[in-house]
Amino acid sequence: MDKSVIEKYELVVGLEVHAQMLTKSKAFSSEANEYGALPNTNVSVITLAHPGTLPKANRKAVEYAVKMGLACNCSITEYNIYDRKNYFYPDLPKGYQITQDKTPICRGGYIDIKTKSGRRSRIRLNRIHMEEDAGKSLHLEGETETLVDLNRAGVPLIEIVTEPDIRYPEEAYAFLTEIRRLVRYLEICDGNMEEGSLRCDANISVRLKGSKELGRKVEVKNMNSITNVQRAIEREMLRQIEIIEKGGTIASETRMYDAVNNQTYSLRTKEALNDYRYFPEPDLPPIIITEEYLREVRAMMPPLPNELFIKFTSEFGLPEYDAGVLTDKKEIALYFLEICKLTQNYKAASNWVMGPIKSYLNELTMEIKEFPLKPSQIVELIELVEQGKISFAICSQRLFPAFIENPNTTALALAEKMNLIQVSDTSFIKPIIEEVLANWAEKVEAYKKGNKNLLGLFMGEVMKKGKGKVDPKVATKLIQEMLDA
Amino acid sequence: MYSSYQEIRKALQKKEVRVKEIVEYYLRKIEETKHLNAYLEVYAEEALSRADEIDKKLQAGKAGNLAGMVITHKDVICYENHRLQASSKILDGFVAQFTAPSLQRMLDADVIVIGRVNCDEFAMGGSNENSAFGVVRNNIDPTRVPGGSSGGSAVSVSADTCLISLGSDTGGSVRQPAAFTGIVGFKPTYSRISRYGLIAYASSFDTIGVLAKNVEDTALVMEYLAGKDEYDATVSQKPVPPYSQLLEIPTHQLKIGYIKEVLETEAVQKEIKEAVWRKIEQFRADGHEVIPVDFPLYEYALPTYYILTTAEASTNLSRYDGVRYGYRSPNAVDVETLYKRTRSEGFGPEVKRRIMLGTFVLSASYYDAYFTKAQKVRRIIRDEMLKLLNNLDFLITPTTPTTAFEIGKYNEENVLELYYADILTVTPSLCGLPAISIPIGLDEKNLPIGLQVTAKYFEEASLLAFAKYAMQN
Amino acid sequence: MNIDKNTIEKIAHLSRLYFNEADEEKMLKSLNEILEWVQMLNKIDTTNVLPLTHMSHEVNVLREDVVEEPLPHEKALFNAPRKDSNYFRVPKVIENE
């Protein structure tokens, strides 16, 4: 399809994101909330919907939902009730899901995003509410029966519903990335789409640019990665535009995304006949959120990625790129923050964290909490370089790994032991330079004739001969002096 | 044999009898009254072996405070490792995997459960004619119904096959059969007793109830049943008074109201009205004030009740689908037919009727007109009742408009008429108020008449004390 | 309010119940009778009255996030009409036609 055709249209997308909460026990019963257990081993009579069982809400699930709401600038609902959403499916034991229909715990709110191409926008939220997950139905090849595993039934979820504010597929990507980052910062969800702890459905429609009316929306499901969400939206947008261009109308339906063929296909279920008959859940008393409770929860919140980003850029003067990398994971950001309490050389701190530390962690697939060096020790390294006692290159390539192996010493002591301390003493450096210049006499001639680039060669040789102990700043100056003499 | 737990306790202490003999007596009575079809299962062996254990404990002075008490449980109360069916085919084969905490407290005090008794299917009915296991017959006159839905419970007590039965009351299911069989039927305040372990019919109405021969036993048992637990989020956190210690006859003047309309209407049987009037005279003679009160709304309680209970029931019964337990239709070929055939074959007609009605009133187009409307009327009726009770100690009415009717009198053709049997008992259920039915005489056919007394929220102690007094002649 | 066969069929489907012709007729009659009867509630003025949704007097009843023993696996599957050693089994769900 011609680009000019596509550009006639505006994409309108709203997302529904489900996030599994990292509580220890389930939403309404006390067995473990655990991924990967053997089938039907994390179930209770309540989860199995045995006759005579009743739900009881998990305090932490409520707290986590409130935290997310606060992080997304939502207003928190004071008077909360739960509702029953009625439908029949083998992995829904009670024949209804306990959710919140009329009184979502968080209303409104927004998330600010920046896409890969640099586009900034604010995606407004409609609501966040609490509900429980269903079990899993397995339809296996060669089986005439469906297998039902109820381990996942009753796991607490929050559902985040956006307004239809997304206009570009890459915005969906950025939005989900930000959700993932937020839930990980808050430690309420591990944000893993591949494992299903984060799930996303998209409501997609198109309209001619400038039109005030919304087009018919299509729900797309089964996108199991953030990348696939973007790809699915791209595909669906094209599909809809094609139909409209040909004079057809969009069927309001649910479609599944097929990642292998990069297509969406229609799910012809009798959706229309599904009347969920929502009504207030009589087995769960109302939850009243007080100002005092909100204060308590706010006090428990970690610094948020956006807050830290602003601090790193405006207060510490770091470039946006650095701030972005540093705030990607909360633990890294907090480690960095600790370093910055002990030194004002923020750029150096940033370089250390983004460079050597991150590489080390990546290589060993280690989390920063297991990293052997304390922030204060990184500051020692920074100061050694700052004071000219060692070059950054030698410090990061040789001292740093050794320090990791020997964390119970000081950087200075170790550097001295390893004989890495740079010498700025001209009486030490001069003879080395003399030797090098003597060995490269023709090049010296060439330099004097005008080939100033050869300075690099001489520097390299001096550093090699000095076994890295030569202070490069002093060396450069001296070499030039001696050459010009 | 013994007509109260106090007598049993004394006899045990004096070693005039052993628990084993008590159980053997009841087992004989159960056998003798088999034709009444009150029992679905008799735990003969278990009861006898428990009796042996408890006799030994009594010898050692280590027996619990309910040692010697023998009870039945309605087929809607969970008793671990025992079958449980709600008198329905759809729970064929189901074995409970836990015990209701309220029952557990009684078991911990050494009560013996002698059997599981028949009831209307899923507690839906007013005559115990809706059971998948056949009708229960009234022991007073076996051609008549014992009332419902706790018909089996009432007969098991009235026919002297046990001392107490634990039933359930949603709109009168404990009080009405108590009235029909001449015993005491008690429904506490909603949320006084945990609902965990009670098969749900209508969540905002259901409560476990007590059927007994006298008020003292009711009060004692309430001490064990009532109170908070870890599993029911709606259960009251209020402390439980020692009901059995608070039964002194009230000495101060009481203010008792009776609903004028009810004692004047043709719809209530003559002898019932007369029996109530006699009681009113007795109260007045004893110095209490008995005044007529107006409650024109009482008729609206019944349709409100039916809309709300069927709505809640329609979802509470969705779990019966043949997937994880119970009956599964052999005619299921896919998931759709699994559900439809299992449920259609497993549920009886009254249950299906109520599920259909409930689904209808919750459906999108009708929700506001029926369900929301009924919830609003519920609030109006509740507020009106509270206003009335504010100026009274108790409110009295007959428990039922008629005495026990003949089996088969009501069928699909006149379902509404059967619903009307509940008309006097539903109002306390709608409001969540505590209410008791006590026997106050017989009609010309020697069928028992019940008086219903309603009190304010959580006033079980004074209600029981008054009931004890009112049962005196 | 008079409901028709169409409505009965929709409600039956939502309730996952199946009625043959005769039973459907009976159900239609019963339900219409009951619905006719409950119309009397319209005589009561409910303007500005809030629906009564919760009968318990408790609020904020929450459970601590502590893990308790699950139901042992065999007990979980014990009552199942059809199962294997791990799963509940049902006839296959038809997703697509």
Image (cartoon, coloured by chain):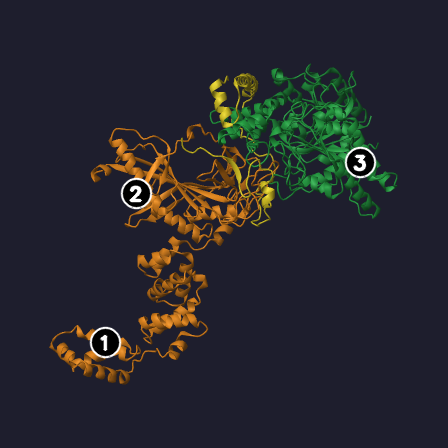
Chain ID of residue with mark 1: A
Classify residue A43 by image quadrant: top right
Tag 3 and tag 2, C-beta contact below 8 Å = no
> From the viewer's perspective, is C35 left or right of B418?
left
Rendering quarter of residue A418: bottom left
Query: Alpha carbon of mark 3 to alpha carbon of mark 1: how far?
Result: 106 Å
* Tag 3 residue: B23
**Chain represented in green:** B
Q: Between C66 and B107, which is closer to the camera in this rendering?
A: B107
Rounded to the nearest whole Å, what is the CA distance between mark 3 and mark 2?
78 Å
Residue A293 placement (x, y as % from top left): 52, 48
Badges 3 and 1: C-beta atoms under 8 Å apart? no
Q: Looking at the image, which residue is at 28% across and 50% down? A: A118
Give the residue at mark 1: A459
The subunit carrying tag 3 is B
Q: Position of residue C34 (x, y in %)?
A: 57, 19
Quarter of the image that includes the N terminus of chain B: top right
Residue in view at x 70 percent, y 35 percent: B459
Q: Are marks 3 and 2 on the same chain?
A: no
Q: Secondary structure at mark 3?
A: helix
Chain in orange on the image: A
Checking the image for residue A168, the label placed there is: 2
Amino acid bearing label 3: Val
